[in-house]
Image: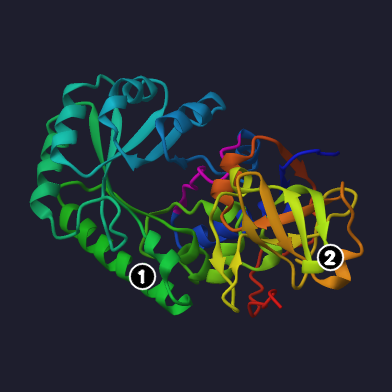
Amino acid sequence: MKTDFPALIIDTGKVESNIERMLSKASKSKAVLRPHFKTHQSARTGEIFRKKGVEKITVSSVQMAEYFAKYGWNDITIAFPLNLLEIEKTDNLAGKIKLNILLDSPFVASEIAKNTKNNIGVFIEIDTGYHRTGLLPGQENEIEKITDIISNTKNLNFKGFLTHAGHTYNANGKEKIIEILNDAKQKMTALKNKWQQRFPDIIVSYGDTPSCSIADNCNGFDEIRPGNFVYYDVMQYHLGSCNLSDIAVSVAAPVTGIYKNRSEIAVYGGAVHLSKEFIAGDNNFSIFGYIVKYNGNFCWNEPLNGAWVKSISQEHGIVHMPANELGKIKQGDVIGILPVHSCLTANLLNKKFFIPSNEPNISPGRHQTTRKNLIK
């Protein structure tokens, strides 16, 4: 296997381990795992989920739902507020698979009721603190208007309440992340209890990788929808969601320049490959990715201490490389970059390689370690 331009390397052993661990947590919590496939957007990665027993999935667009429906996925939730300009496509897809959509507006509910012929499941999206989309738990009049429209429309089925606690990504520490999860659980449970007498079969659906990874369990939710956990990334590592050994993807980047006078190398791998996501390192450096070395099969171990992507432009990445490693590298070599945000990186890179794990005996249990300072 070789690549002469940036490519995504996917360690299938780590992917399997990450899936098994989340399935175990869902089972322990008596919740259904409906993973979000927006992270990998890959039919092949999807097959790993299927082999592990996953039958229900989440996506973020009608186009993504159509893609996975072609590969046999027939129970899909589109976790994005319904786009009225895609009603026809949504309705057509609902005629082929079991499809769930999100609503947070009585007006949109009335439009979908008037313009669909096929059976569609409907979740009302609830804003439990992220403040992106969704109704606040206290907006009961709006909720009632939507449920009335659903009840009076033969082909719409009220599924329950759905939330995404995306504000965990801005949380300061694991305790705050668990606090966000518990707050969402309290709000969603209260809604379910209030509406369950009228709609006995409704569920509450919760999605978020940091809290689903860090919490001992996800009791209180009927369904969990983490997505990033399948690959993880540097951001999740810094949040405490995973260990470095759990990160299942890297970007193969050819070395194009070596600059010993400033302890840097240039690589073919920039914003159009990695995205512009970054995190602040412990010493106030911007980190656009950690650096790993590949063996002959593109497997990797721990990141190199003192090596990170310090800046990016459209095609270029500038990597700080410690002096003891600079002498081992030459132009034409390929190094690996652990991405800051694997969802965006996987979306940007069309060329993908699936490799067997370098660590075949990874346990599905957690082995939490203290976060290492790789920036020196």
Residue 358 appears in the figure: no
Q: Of the residues tagged 1 and 2, which is closer to the observer?
A: 2
Tell whether 333 sits left or right of 376: right
Residue 337 appears in the figure: yes
The magenta span reads 32-42
Tell whether 130 sits left or right of 200: right
Pick the front one: 207 or 219: 207
| Residue found at x 32% / y 23% | 91
Image quarter where the N terminus lies is: top right
| First in sequence: mark 1 vs mark 2 | 1
Residue 286, above or below 121: below
Tell whether 268 sits left or right of 189: right
Pick the front one: 99 or 325: 325
Badge 1 vs badge 2, beta-carbon distance below 8 Å: no
User: Mark 1 highlights which residue?
Assistant: 180
Main secondary structure found in the magenta portion: loop
Residue 325, above or below 68: below
| Residue found at x 34% / y 26% | 90
Is residue 157 rendered magenta in the image? no
Image quarter where the C terminus lies is: bottom right
The amino acid on which the numbered mark 2 sits, given as a three-letter code, is Lys
Say which mark, if any, is on residue 260: 2
